[in-house]
Image (cartoon, rainbow, N blue to C red):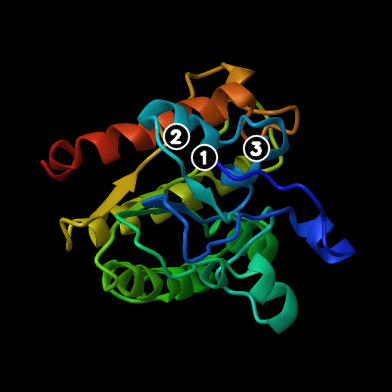
Amino acid sequence: MIRCIALLAPLIALLGCTEPVTSDTQSRILLLGDSLMAMHRSQGKSVAHSLEQALDEPVIDRSVAGARYLYALPISGSMGLNITKQYRPGNWDWIVLNGGGNDIWMGCGCGPCERRIGRLISEDGHRGRIPGFLSKLRQTGAQVVFVGYLRTPGVTSPIEGCTDDGDEMDRRLSRLAALDQGLHFVSLADLVPHGDRSYHGLDLIHPSVKGSRAIGKRIAEVISNPANDAD
């Protein structure tokens, strides 16, 4: 995977360095999303790196920490804080992405959030910012993998109150994936054993290196055996 060598501006430094897509890009896998994906990238131990190791092929990682779907600012949005702006055309067989957590946490503080969740994805999974974006990605011919969020390990964390919202998002995303065999939802709800802090960083929000590795492996299982996921 192409590594970031230099920062072009202070804002790029703030957002994190994403990988470019050029006419000679050889990878067939594109990864988009927020800090769940971007964590540990500078160490070469992000979800994308884990995915590369599991599949033994390159992954283009354009994820940006703090990115959202409901993001209106044009300049920083175009640089990746709007997840839909991270996409670049290419010969992608697979597009892997996540997102929505920052929209809920920053928008609702994990309080009553039904209206905002509804803007992201409707109860039946048919409408909203996420289904609309995933439909556009599927129209490129690529298969799409949408990844859910880690749950807390059963100890107090800043997002403890988001559990119900996370469960509801998973239900809606599962309904969306059921509509299209080329769309795969990877839930992380069962990834963290109760009481096991080793999958999280010190903030108990973001994945640890171990967590990023486990997430990458779970995604790789879907890409390697998409028919099993469809079943």
Q: Residues within 10 Å of mark 2 (few under 14, many from 20)?
A: many
Quadrant occupied by the N terminus: top right
Residue type highlighted by circle 1? Ala
Residue 85, position as x, y percentages in the image: 56, 72
Residue drawn at 62 percent across, 29 percent down: 45
Quarter of the C terminus within the rendering: top left
Q: Earlier in the sequence, mark 3 or mark 1?
A: 1
Q: Position of residue 145 (x, y in %)?
A: 34, 51
Task: Check contact, mark 1 vs mark 2: CB within 8 A.
Answer: yes
What's the mark number on residue 48? 1
* Rendered location of residue 103, percent (x, y): 60, 64
Which amino acid type corresponds to the residue marked 3 in the rendered image? Answer: His
Earlier residue among tags 2 and 3: 2
Q: Residue at x 61, y 70 (%)?
A: 82
Q: Nearer the viewer, mark 2 or mark 3?
A: 2
Is residue 150 at all visible to an observer of this figure? Answer: no
Task: Name the residue at 66% across, 43% down.
Answer: 3
Mark 2 is on which residue type?
Leu
Contact check, label 2 and label 3, Cβ < 8 Å: no
The span from disc 1 to disc 2 (Cα, nearest Å) is: 5 Å
Does 211 appear above or below 88?
above
**Left or right placement of residue 116 versus residue 110 in this view:** left
Callout 3 secondary element:
loop
Give the residue number, with chain letter if any, for mark 2: 51
